[in-house]
């Protein structure tokens, strides 16, 4: 199923997972999936390392298992910076053979280890490439606080509009910790003529290292109340985890009340945290807007 259809019917709840690290047992992902699929998400998306290569085959296998073994719609992430057009065709053919219908088309994170393969510079180029050759449902990323490399929010929104016009059916946001950034972003997107559903990416922050990594990588701003929470509980891992879960629930309740199209939970492969959030909000997701 092409997941763009879902937004016509309901407030969507989806999860993001990542393939196990090379040092971890391959089977650990099935423990994660056993826990997450029991929460009946509308779809599960599987990340893909921007370097291309070996990580990609894990993404395809896991996305295929989500769809064909667990009977839940899956989305395969596909970053293009590290792959050639020939490699893109191989990956896309393999996704098609595995009955995967939905792709999150990305440029990919640029790190000191990322080597550009030279064929794609931006996600929009990959989206056009897929659109011309395949029938996948294409999703793309967006950034409520602006992408860290952008000169301005306006420039970022203009590039986003172009990206959507290349053939995107819905957007998923980077995590944010203040819903006002999301609401302002949605207003700017509407003014720019972007009219596809926007799913809000929510990450329950459960440890200090995790948030430090996110600030460095994504350039997100930390609201005062979030900083206070971290300061109060940083030396008590259980209290910090509980506070992080409560903070995410608070964000989600507000977003649902304001009629968000969907919630995309960055699960960090942690079914316990996802379950606590699911239990707090799933009845709210089912309430129709009057
Ligand atoms: P783009 O849309 O190409 O934008 C990148 C930058 O270029 C922006 O500053 C934009 O304004 C600018 N730009 C866009 N088009 C043009 C143009 N034509 N000319 C000049 N500038 C332009 N990374 C991974 O490696 N693997 C993953 O699995 C992954 N999953 C993600 C999931 C989500 C929901 C999100 C939000 C991000 C994910 N990322 C992932 C991170 C993402 O790859 C990075 O944020 C990356 O830096 C940008 O990717 P993009 O697809 O948004 O790029």
Image (cartoon, grey):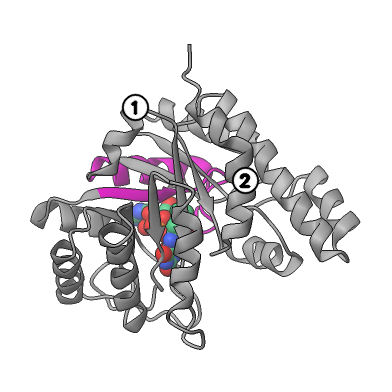
**Identity of the residue drawn at 48% across and 11% down:** 290
Is residue 146 part of the magenta span, yes or no? yes
Where 55 sits versus 40, above or below? below
| Residue 135 on image: x %, y % | 13, 50
First-in-chain label (1 vs 2): 1
Indicate the quadrant containing the N terminus: top left, top right, bottom left or bottom right. top left
Q: Is residue 38 left or right of residue 230?
A: left
Where 130 sits versus 285, above or below? below
Q: Is residue 125 left or right of residue 40?
A: left
Q: From the viewer's side, name the closer residue of 79 and 264.
A: 264
Q: Secondary structure at mark 1?
A: loop
Could you say which quadrant of the image residue 219 lies in?
bottom right
Do labels 1 and 2 touch, CB within 8 Å?
no
| Residue 30 on image: x %, y % | 43, 70
**Identity of the residue drawn at 30% across and 65% down:** 65
Q: Secondary structure at mark 2?
A: helix
**Identity of the residue drawn at 59% across and 65% down:** 217
| Residue 54 on image: x %, y % | 33, 83
Is residue 163 part of the magenta span, yes or no? yes
Circle 1 packing at 10 Å, graded few (<14), some (14-19), many (20+), is: few
Label 2 belongs to which residue?
Answer: 277
How far apart are the two marked residues, 1 and 2, measured between alpha carbons? Answer: 22 Å
Label 1 belongs to which residue?
Answer: 9
Q: From the viewer's side, name the closer residue of 164 and 246.
A: 246
Where 154 sits versus 89, above or below? above
| Residue 236 on image: x %, y % | 87, 64
**Identity of the residue drawn at 41% across and 51% down:** 141
Q: From the viewer's side, name the closer residue of 178 and 156.
A: 178
């Amino acid at each position: 199923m092409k997941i763009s259809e879902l937004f016509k019917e309901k407030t969507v709840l989806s999860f993001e997972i990542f393939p196990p690290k090379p040092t971890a047992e391959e089977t650990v992902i099935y423990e994660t999936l056993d826990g997450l699929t029991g929460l009946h998400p509308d779809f599960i998306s599987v990340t893909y390392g921007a370097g291309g290569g070996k990580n990609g085959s894990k993404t395809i296998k896991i996305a295929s298992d989500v769809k064909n073994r667990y009977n839940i719609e899956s989305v395969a992430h596909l970053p293009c910076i590290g792959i050639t057009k020939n490699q893109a065709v191989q990956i896309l053919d393999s996704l098609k053979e595995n009955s995967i219908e939905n792709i999150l088309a990305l440029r990919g994170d640029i790190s000191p280890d990322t080597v550009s393969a030279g064929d794609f510079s931006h996600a929009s180029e990959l989206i056009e490439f897929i659109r011309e050759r395949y029938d996948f449902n294409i999703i793309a990323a967006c950034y409520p606080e602006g992408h860290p490399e952008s000169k301005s929010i306006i420039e970022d929104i203009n590039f986003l509009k172009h990206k959507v016009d290349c053939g995107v059916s819905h957007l998923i946001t980077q995590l944010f910790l203040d819903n006002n950034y999301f609401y302002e972003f949605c207003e700017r997107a509407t003014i720019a003529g972007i009219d596809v559903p926007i799913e809000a990416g929510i990450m329950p922050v459960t440890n200090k290292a995790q948030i430090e990594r996110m600030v460095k990588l994504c350039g997100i701003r930390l609201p005062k109340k979030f900083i206070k929470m971290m300061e109060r509980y940083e030396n008590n891992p259980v209290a910090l985890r509980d506070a992080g879960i409560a903070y995410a629930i608070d964000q989600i309740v507000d977003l649902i009340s304001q009629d968000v199209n969907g919630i995309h939970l960055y699960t960090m492969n942690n079914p316990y945290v996802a379950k606590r959030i699911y239990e707090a909000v799933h009845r709210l997701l089912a309430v129709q807007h009057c």
